[in-house]
């Protein structure tokens, strides 16, 4: 029996994880669930799975929660400190980190400090604090298993060879809704356009990141730390079908890939059950029906955000915290109508360029850089 805590259970990763647990009820049990503010959805999950702990990190929601909304066996806690408690519960063997953005770092850190298996879907944890996170896992004996489909694919393909024989990894990108748009047309792209992803169903922030390819920039940084690679060993290719989730090339020229229909339940389940594989509930590829797989290099003019990821992967230090924070605010401003679509990458470039580079920041210093970058991005104005 695997006892699981899900951080961010009402988001897209969290709800997919709940489906996985429901399908494996005889071998998986949820012991804690958390949300930021969607307490009604959290309550419904608690009635279904009966965890011992439910957390609403937005403490202001306390006044909204009706008496009897949660089952009697579920203790309801409020505030961000309670997320840390959920991540470090003694009975939780696996912690699924599905909280979007830098907000997910604190819970992920607590799980690693407690020596848990961390199924990490929150790429920002490694983008912001990659070296510190990996060192913490080594020190406590915690396991860090990727849930991002691309990093899960690499994790699986790496099992076929020795790490010293890896030449490079290739992250696949769908290209998002603007894969075929001319660069000049992007100036008129609306939030509705950016949220119309052709293959994946995700939350709004991640969907916009896919449209800018900032998600791939962040995944480059994540892969650099997660797999202990040099930035020069990481490539990106556009693959609109989202069937090949990533590839590993070995020094002899062999290229190994992991393929499956685009569905997050497969990498979530694998992160929970690793090294075992169990019958899954994700859709299967149908090789009796003809289909094609296309690959092309990304267009740097259409996707300028991608170069930022490679730059940060090379530089390290506090640059990941700055880029991630700046992007989170820029995406929110785009969705709110105060930035154009091309302004997202342009503004992130300028904030990254003007930060005071620190090659080896502490966690406290990374948090300060995060706050600084958010303030800078809130103040940023497009040049006339």
Image: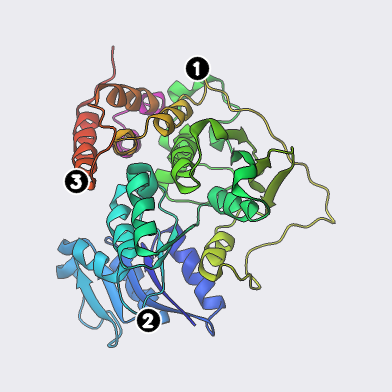
Q: Nearer the viewer, mark 1 or mark 3?
A: 3
Q: Quadrant of the C terminus?
A: top left
Q: Magenta region, mostly helix, strand or loop? A: helix
Q: Is 31 positioned to the left or the right of 39 in the image?
A: right
Label 1 residue SS: helix
Q: Along the line of sight, which residue is nearer the eye, 97 or 41?
A: 97
Disc 1 or 3, which lies upstream in sequence? Answer: 1
User: At 58% from the left edge and 33% from the top edge, which residue is drawn?
Assistant: 235
Q: Position of residue 197 (x, y in %)?
A: 54, 42
Q: Position of residue 194 (x, y in %)?
A: 47, 36
From what the image shows, is residue 4 above or below residue 146?
A: below
Q: Along the line of sight, which residue is nearer the eye, 26 or 224?
A: 224
How far apart marks 1 and 2 lie (CA) works out to 50 Å
Disc 3 or 2, which lies upstream in sequence? Answer: 2
Residue receiving disc 2: 47
| Mark 2 burial class by Cα count in 10 Å: few <14, some 14-19, many 20+ | some
Q: Position of residue 375 (x, y in %)?
A: 19, 34
How far apart marks 1 and 3 lie (CA) works out to 41 Å
Residue receiving disc 3: 364
Q: Give the image quarter of residue 81.
A: bottom left
Total tally of numbered discs in the picture? 3
Q: Nearer the viewer, mark 3 or mark 2?
A: 3
Q: Give the image quarter of residue 355.
A: top left
Disc 1 or 2, which lies upstream in sequence? Answer: 2
Q: Which mark is residue 184?
A: 1
Label 3 residue SS: helix
């Amino acid at each position: 029996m695997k006892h699981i805590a899900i951080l961010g259970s009402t988001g897209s990763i969290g709800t997919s994880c709940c489906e996985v647990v429901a399908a494996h009820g005889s071998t998986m049990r949820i012991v804690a669930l958390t949300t930021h503010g969607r307490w009604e959805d959290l309550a419904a999950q608690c009635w279904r799975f009966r965890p011992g702990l439910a957390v609403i990190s937005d403490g202001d929601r306390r006044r909204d929660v009706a008496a009897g909304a949660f089952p009697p066996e579920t203790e309801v806690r409020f505030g961000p400190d309670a997320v840390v408690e959920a991540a470090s519960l003694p009975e939780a063997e696996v912690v699924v980190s599905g909280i979007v953005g830098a907000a997910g770092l604190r819970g992920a850190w607590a799980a690693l400090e407690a020596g848990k298996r961390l199924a990490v879907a929150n790429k920002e944890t490694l983008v912001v604090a990659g070296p510190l996170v990996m060192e913490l896992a080594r020190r406590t004996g915690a396991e860090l298993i990727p849930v991002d489909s691309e990093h899960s694919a690499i994790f699986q393909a790496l099992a076929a060879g020795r790490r010293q024989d890896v030449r490079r990894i290739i992250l696949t990108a769908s290209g998002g809704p603007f894969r075929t748009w001319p660069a000049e047309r992007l100036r008129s792209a609306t939030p509705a356009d950016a949220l119309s992803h052709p293959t994946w169903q995700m939350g709004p922030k991640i969907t916009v990141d896919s449209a800018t390819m900032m998600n791939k920039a962040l995944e480059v940084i994540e892969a650099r730390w997660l797999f202990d690679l040099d930035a020069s060993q990481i490539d990106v290719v556009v693959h609109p079908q989202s069937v090949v989730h990533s590839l590993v090339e070995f020094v002899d020229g062999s290229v190994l890939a992991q393929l499956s229909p685009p569905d997050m339940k497969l990498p979530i389940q694998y992160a929970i059950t690793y090294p075992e594989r169990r019958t899954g509930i994700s859709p299967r590829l149908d090789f009796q029906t003809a289909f094609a797989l296309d690959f092309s290099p990304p267009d740097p003019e259409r996707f300028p955000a991608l170069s930022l990821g490679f730059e940060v992967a090379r530089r390290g230090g506090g640059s990941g915290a700055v880029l991630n924070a700046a992007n989170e605010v820029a995406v929110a401003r785009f969705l709110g109508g105060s930035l154009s679509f091309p302004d997202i990458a342009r503004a992130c470039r300028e904030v990254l360029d003007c930060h005071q580079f620190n090659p080896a920041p502490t966690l406290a210093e990374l948090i300060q850089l995060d706050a600084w970058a958010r303030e800078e991005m809130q103040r940023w104005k497009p040049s006339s």
